[in-house]
Image (spheres, helix red, strand yellow):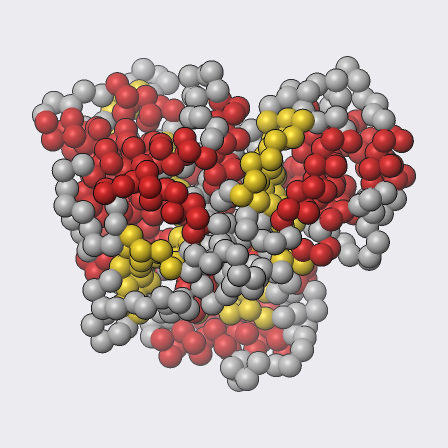
């Protein structure tokens, strides 16, 4: 066991990355995220932490993704990925914050490192392996270089995969760490990723007529070139037309395009000519989110968001499991039907929750916002379907469920076909993390298998009108969410005022929570009609702004 490191080497390496401003860093919902020009010391600190995390896992490979997802192009960010492709454990988020803020001096960083090494009893004689990738942001390359300095000064090995989607980085991390085991996830290469998805998609859709071409909005980000490559592997099995694929021209990334824009504005992206009868989807800047949409004949925009993707997937998998009569081996020796569950957040549309519970008769679990929370809750089921309303999510299969699919023998040709489809779904769906390309193929495979149109899919249930707004406040830390983000415990008194407003509206629901990724609080509202929804939302925005620290000019939309 070694617990000492070369302090002179650390001090020397830090001297090129010293924090010079008064910025305070915080590892939040999606890692560190801010204006790219501030990130250099953070990247160096993350390099150090990745080495410690790898040594802690006895040399398992840790992933680092450099991206700011749907944020504007000038921003960037970084997040750490655990050996099986999950997000960094919460107990280490504090260490990330401490290290990043200790980059102001050699003494501070040395003592921060020593304290983590002691607390976590890290044996520095263990090897350390780190892999890194980045999205298309122009700032990414230099930030990776700062990370490399951090990794190397503590003697870690680093492999740079260059340009990747976030889910591709999670995929290779899981592949590397499961290689040679019975859970081997695949070859850790970009090509193998495309091959795996394309082969599974072809298996499920073989013999069915192809759907009409899908319009894909690449948000002018990494999803666009990745889609072009995936398209080559899919060949004739999938027809699509890519728009917003200009990753070179600066300033266009996510600009009035991408999944976040489409979800929040409930309109088609810039750069897409969406005609009646066409089907479309939008990826976000790092291709881990997707939403689908179409227009009615009268031009009405219809969004098929994460809630709709979750219900489509859960319904499909339940149907297949029923046809295949899948029974799962339990620890007590019994065999029982597949246990499917759905995980949502407070942002899920109320109609979707009612549909899942009442029509699909599937249990729903609610967690706070942020996929790491949903992911853990989904692991409790044989098949855990989790999606945030914004289109970020996936489906998890338990080892027992995968085993049941592998060993089941169909009693009829129809049952055999359903089993084959279930097996292929476990290959098609990214088990590590929500993945826009994998989710896109999941939706398209389901719709092809069921020969279902977007309109038919949309008619499963009717969304309640909803509105999401942001309020700029002096200190968002004053807002403390409880009950899976549906209520606030602080500031004292605000929740009662929100409740008073909600009670005035038919089917009213409204909650306020601080964002983990932006310096604002979010207000979400639902009610029976569009007018009532907007009124409820803007009344609560006004309440927050006027009584609880609103800053800047009061937006004219806020009520009363
Ligand atoms: C309402 C909303 O969409 N919130 C998003 C957003 O988090 P906030 O904490 O709300 O800023 O970014 C997260 C990371 O991408 C994502 O997981 C989450 O769903
Ligand atoms: Mg994203």
Left or right: where 213 falls relative to 42? left
Question: 137 or 91, which is in the foreground?
Answer: 137
Residue 429 can be seen, yes or no: yes
Quadrant assignment for the N terminus: top right
Residue shown at 28% from the left, 38% from the top: 201
- Image position of 341 with respect to 353: above or below: above
How many marks the image carries: the answer is 0
Question: 430 or 222, which is in the foreground?
Answer: 222
Q: Residue furthest left?
A: 412
- Image position of 193 with respect to 343: above or below: above
Left or right: where 555 falls relative to 184? right
Question: 321 or 433, which is in the foreground?
Answer: 433
Left or right: where 79 falls relative to 192? right
Residue 31 can be seen, yes or no: no
Residue shown at 14% from the left, 38% from the top: 207
| Residue 360 percent coordinates (x, y) | 25, 47
- Image position of 101 with respect to 477: above or below: above
Residue shown at 67% from the left, 78% from the top: 552
| Residue 75 percent coordinates (x, y) | 62, 58
Residue shown at 31% from the left, 15% from the top: 333
| Residue 458 percent coordinates (x, y) | 25, 59
- Image position of 435 with respect to 332: above or below: below
């Amino acid at each position: 066991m070694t617990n000492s490191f070369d302090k002179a080497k650390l001090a020397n390496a830090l001297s090129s990355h010293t924090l010079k401003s008064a910025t305070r860093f915080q590892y939040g919902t999606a890692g560190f995220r801010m204006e790219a020009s501030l990130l250099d010391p953070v990247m160096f600190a993350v390099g150090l932490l990745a080495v410690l995390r790898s040594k802690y896992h006895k040399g398992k490979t840790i992933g680092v993704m450099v991206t700011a997802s749907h944020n504007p192009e000038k921003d960037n960010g970084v997040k750490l990925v655990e050996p099986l492709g999950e997000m960094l454990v919460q107990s280490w988020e504090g260490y990330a914050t401490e290290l990043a803020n200790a980059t102001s001096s050699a003494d501070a960083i040395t003592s921060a490192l020593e304290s983590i090494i002691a607390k976590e009893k890290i044996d520095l004689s263990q090897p350390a392996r780190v892999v890194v990738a980045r999205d298309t942001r122009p700032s990414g390359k230099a930030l990776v270089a700062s990370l490399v300095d951090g990794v190397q000064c503590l003697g870690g090995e680093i492999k740079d995969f260059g340009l990747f989607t976030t889910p591709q980085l999670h995929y290779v991390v899981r592949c590397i760490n499961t290689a040679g085991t019975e859970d081997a996830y695949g070859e850790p290469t970009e090509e193998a990723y495309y091959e795996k998805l394309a082969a599974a998609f072809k298996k499920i859709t073989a013999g069915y007529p192809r759907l009409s071409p899908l319009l894909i909005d690449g948000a002018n980000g990494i999803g666009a070139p990745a889609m072009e490559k995936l398209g080559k592997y899919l060949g004739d099995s999938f027809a699509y037309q890519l728009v917003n694929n200009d990753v070179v021209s600066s300033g266009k990334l996510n600009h009035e395009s991408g999944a976040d824009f489409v979800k929040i504005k409930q309109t088609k992206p810039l750069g897409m000519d969406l005609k009646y009868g066409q089907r479309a989807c939008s990826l976000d800047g790092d291709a881990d989110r997707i939403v689908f949409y179409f227009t009615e004949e009268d031009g009405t925009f219809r969004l098929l968001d994460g809630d709709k993707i979750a219900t489509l997937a859960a319904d499909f998998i339940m149907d297949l499991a029923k046809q295949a009569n899948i029974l799962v081996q339990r620890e007590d020796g019994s065999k029982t039907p597949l246990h499917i569950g759905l995980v949502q957040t407070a942002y899920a549309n109320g109609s979707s929750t009612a549909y899942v519970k009442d029509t699909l008769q599937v249990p729903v679990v609610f967690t706070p916002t942020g996929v790491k929370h949903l992911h853990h809750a989904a692991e409790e089921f044989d098949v855990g379907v989790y999606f945030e309303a914004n289109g970020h999510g996936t489906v998890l299969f338990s080892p027992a469920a995968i085993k049941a699919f592998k060993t089941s023998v169909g009693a009829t040709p129809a049952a055999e076909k359903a089993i084959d489809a279930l097996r292929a779904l476990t290959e098609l769906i990214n088990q590590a993390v929500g993945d826009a390309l994998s989710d896109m193929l999941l939706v398209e495979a389901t719709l092809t298998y069921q020969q279902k149109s977007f309109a038919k899919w949309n008619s499963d249930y009717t969304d309640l009108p909803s509105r999401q707004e942001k309020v700029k406040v002096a200190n968002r830390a004053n807002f403390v969410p409880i009950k899976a983000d549906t209520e606030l415990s602080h500031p004292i008194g605000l929740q009662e005022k929100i409740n008073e407003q909600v009670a005035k509206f038919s089917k009213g629901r409204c909650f306020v929570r601080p964002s983990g990724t932006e310096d604002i609080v979010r207000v979400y509202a639902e009610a029976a009609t569009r007018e009532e929804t907007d009124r409820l939302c803007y009344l609560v925005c006004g309440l927050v702004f006027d009584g609880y620290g609103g800053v800047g000019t009061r937006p004219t939309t806020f009520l009363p």
